[in-house]
Image: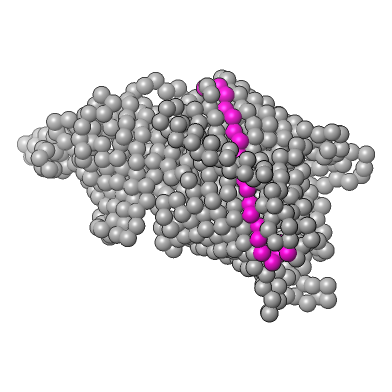
Amino acid sequence: MKRILILSLFFIVGQLVFAQSASEIIERANQKMQGETNRAEMVMKIIRPDWSREIQMKSWTKGTEYSLVLITAPVRDQGSAFLKRETELWNWQPTINRVIKMPPSMMMQSWMGSDFTNDDLVKQSSIVEDYDHEMLGDTIIGMREAWKIELIPKPDAAVVWGRLEVYIDKKDYLELLIKYYDEDEYLINTMIMSDIREMGGRVIPTKMEVIPAENPDQRTVITYKDMEFDQPMDDSFFSLQNMKRVR
Amino acid sequence: MRYYLLVTCFLFLLSLRGYAQSEDEKKWLLKGYLKDMSTFNFVDSDSTLIDNLIHHRLNVAWYPNEHLTGKIEFRTRVFHGDVVGLIPDYGRFIDVNDDYFDLSWMSVNNNRVVIHTMIDRLYLQWNKNDWEVTAGRQRINWGVNLAWNPNDLFNTYSFYDFDYEERPGSDALRIKKYTGFASEVDFAIKVADSFEELTAAGRYQFNKWNYDIQFLGGVMQNHLALGSGWAGNLGNAGFKGELTYLNQFNSNEQGWLVSTTLDYLFSNSLYFNGAVLYSSFGQKKSDLFVVDTRSNLDIKSLSPYRMSTFVQASYPVHPLVNLGLSNIFFPSDASVFINPYVTYSVLQNLDLDLISQLYFGENLNGDYHAVSKVVYFRVKWSY
């Protein structure tokens, strides 16, 4: 009996150690891609079998709390910007010279018709804080050895997904693949990261592709053109004033 | 002659654009669009008035240094068609200009074609730390709602005037100080010859309980104006509102305008916006032409009725095709404005719109009928 107890204790402790390291891996990978702050220039291409559209933007991000996105192309939307502070979201429309406060229901919506949501872009939810992490095992993605980690949203987290499977490169702690499942266990989206190279002083994947499971012939591709990490950014940078001024 | 001058000017600016892109990309920014809109006005069963409007807009921004911004924006419109011939001196009819300086001109004005050019933005803006000073023709947009903006003391707009999203500007001086991430103190004064024509007001905006809240006060064309507005949320829905109190100087006339909005985006991208407007300046039964598309209104004429309700629903039937229906209903006499529309993004920079504006109400004999039926077809190329 005692032996069983000790054994199960070992088992529980083992689980704990395992779980902790899964969280640490996720945190480290997230830190690598996000930094304390980051500034990025990117191109988003929405690809469908019979049409495609391209949106270019610049973004400034500090943690999951603060984010600012400026649209630089297409010319019709150029200059319009999105500001997120904690749970509030604003949109600047330079043509009509007005700041529009957006309802929270807009956060989970598709970003400009793409396979990304507003939430993906302004990083409302955090894969570190809003999920419980569990190590599922080792695997190989492309030529790289990787961990397979399961993420289950915490009960009170404002997350649309039921479960995520995240594959992290063992050598450089890079997110390589994320599978998004809904609450009924259906695969909804697959995100593939590639073009791993040095940008902003870090080795990171510079291309992210989201493929919806229901329509495998369509995808949304984000390509980073430039990135900069951990430049000091004051909280006051993320203001209505600056949303109108950034270029 | 003036038009040729403008074309030359435009070509010069275009060449600058080439220069700007290669040499000094940050200093100059040029963009604009070209629209062509056909209007079909179904007057009665056997008569349709057809007009065409070519519309060009050029926006030039100049950034000489990090503290200074200059902007000049032109719109040139070429009107041609049945209504141009029917209305005597059509050029004067469309040359609405309530601004102090006359920055519009007509290079052609006859009963077949009218070419009208207008500068609706011309200002310099100076920024330093938390201060922002803007002088010149600018748009001062204090509104919060989509349909009706009682807080818009300077550049009131009409929802019916869908083909002018930029809206006219005011010849004004505006001084603003940002006091926090979503708070600011703002003062604006419009150029005027007399106190009766003067609009000058201050506004304080702050962020509290996840709401943007503003208070404003000043004079608006011989009225004392006091108002407040808010933008926040109830649950996951957006909740916005504006109210303004007006009291005419040397007169007993006074009144209120109140408008609130709820909007919500469903997970399938169906978007709803619902609003009501109460105006104590309105009447129970309107004898005015309801669909007022004049660009320069004042807030007292936001609606000719006491009560007005607005509902808009839009839904992307395809990622490139958006279907929408706006509806303004006046409960006191059951007249209704119905505005269905389809927008289609044909190419990255080319959009097609099919828009209809229908107005049903009682005529002088008390018969309920379609007072106005207009269909617009618009092509827009942005560059």
B145 sits to left or right of A162: right
Percent of width and height locating residue A64: 38, 33
Q: Nearer the viewer, residue B379 or A70?
A: B379
The front one of A14 and B259 is B259
Residue drawn at x 83%, y 76% as measured from the top left: B365
B380 or B113: nearer the eye? B113
**Residue B369 at least partly seen:** yes
Residue at (65, 61) in percent of width and height: B80
* Color style of the picture: one colour
Tell me which residue sits at (23%, 45%) in the image: A192
Does residue A31 lie above or below B259 as drawn?
above
Q: Is residue B81 magenta?
A: yes
Q: Is A215 left, or right, of B163 in this rendering? A: left
Residue B19: image x %, image y %?
Answer: 45, 31
In this rendering, the count of numbered labels is 0
Outermost residue on the bottom side: it is: B46
User: What range is drawn magenta here?
Assistant: B66-85
Q: Is residue B47 left or right of residue A105?
A: right
Viewer-side residue, B314 vs B85? B85
Q: Give residue A96's quadrant in the image.
A: top right
In the rendered view, does A154 fall on the left or right side of B18? left
Name the spot of residue A48 as percent of width and height, x first: 31, 57
- Residue B26: image location, x then y, percent: 46, 28
| Residue B276 visible in this rendered orientation of the protein | no
Task: Please report the residue visible at 75 percent of the width from the left and 65 percent of the height from the top.
Answer: B86
The rendered magenta stretch, by its main secondary structure, is classed as strand
Quarter placement of the N terminus of chain B? top right
